[in-house]
Every structure is written in C-alpha cells, then in structure tokens.
Image (cartoon, rainbow, N blue to C red):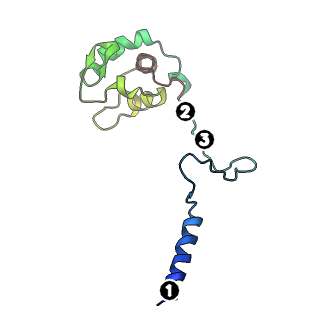
Amino acid sequence: MRRLVPLAAALVALVLLGAGCDTSKPGEKTVSPLPSGPVTGVKVQQAAAVPAKYRHGDPTAGKAVFTSAGCVGCHTLKAANATGTVGPNLDQAKPALSLVVDRITHGRGAMPNFSTQLSTKQIADVAAFVVSSTGGNPNG
C-alpha cells in the first residue's frame, strides 16, 4: 500500500504535465513552443454558391416583391415595416444572400417554396432587398 502512494503521486504529476497544466503564477509569462511551418488541417469556410441568375437583384424592386408576395405577414423587417412573427426576424438574422435564395427557392419549415410563384428576377430582387436592408453578406 505504501508503494502505491508515491506511484499514484508520480502518475498524477505525469498526467498534469502531459495535459499542459500551467504551474506559473498569475502575471508570469509562460513560454511554449510555437508551431514551425504552416498550420495544416484548418478548414477555411467557403462562401455558399449563389447561382448567377440570383446575384444581381434590384433591392428597390425587391421591396415591392417582399410586400406583394406576403413576406410581411411572416417576417419582421424594419425596411419593409413588417412585424410578422411566424418566420425569423430578418433584422436580427442578417441572412447571407445564399441563405435567402435557398429559403425562397426551396422553403423550410413553415416557409413555403416560392420558386413556382416568383420569377427568377423577382427572387433575385427580393433576396437583394433582404440582404441589403439587413446588412447580410451579399457574397455568401
């Protein structure tokens, strides 16, 4: 039994050192080795692809589409004086262009697919309006 105590203490010390525990006092500088060469294995998030036909919509025309297509009934969007609560608050969500186009053309949850009700130009316009008025990413 007496032999187990030093063995256990040594094992705990090895585990703490192996885990990278810092035994320095607050305010002391801890120096650790920096990686040499390029860091690999880091994934870079790619911007979602937006079909070219939806890339250059007219936000001004999109505001009219947002109102006439019934978007105001479900979404909150200050730029359209919309206060709907069924869908997400677009002012808070600040959706990227790729997400807006995807939701309009495929729907999701309570959001219906509008690809058969809106023309390609209308989809591009309303998507441009949502993204420009919320500050969402127009390239992603």
- N-terminal of the pair, mark 3 or mark 2, is 3
Residue 35: horizontal and vertical position, in percent? 71, 51
Q: Name the foreground residue: 77 vs 115.
A: 77
Judge depth for marks 3 and 1 and give the one in front.
1
Q: Residue at horizontal 56%, vertical 45%?
A: 27
- N-terminal of the pair, mark 3 or mark 1, is 1
Q: Residue at horizontal 28%, vertical 30%?
A: 87
Q: Name the foreground residue: 32 vs 124.
A: 32
Query: Relative to residue 48, is residue 113 drawn left or right?
Result: left
Q: CA distance from mark 1 to mark 2?
A: 61 Å
Judge depth for marks 3 and 2 and give the one in front.
3
Q: Residues within 10 Å of mark 1 (few under 14, many from 20)?
A: few
The numbered disc on residue 49 is 2
- Report the residue marked by disc 3: 44
- Report the residue marked by disc 1: 4
Q: Name the foreground residue: 21 vs 126.
A: 21
Q: Is residue 46 above or below residue 7?
A: above
Type of amino acid at the residue the image marks with label 2: Ala
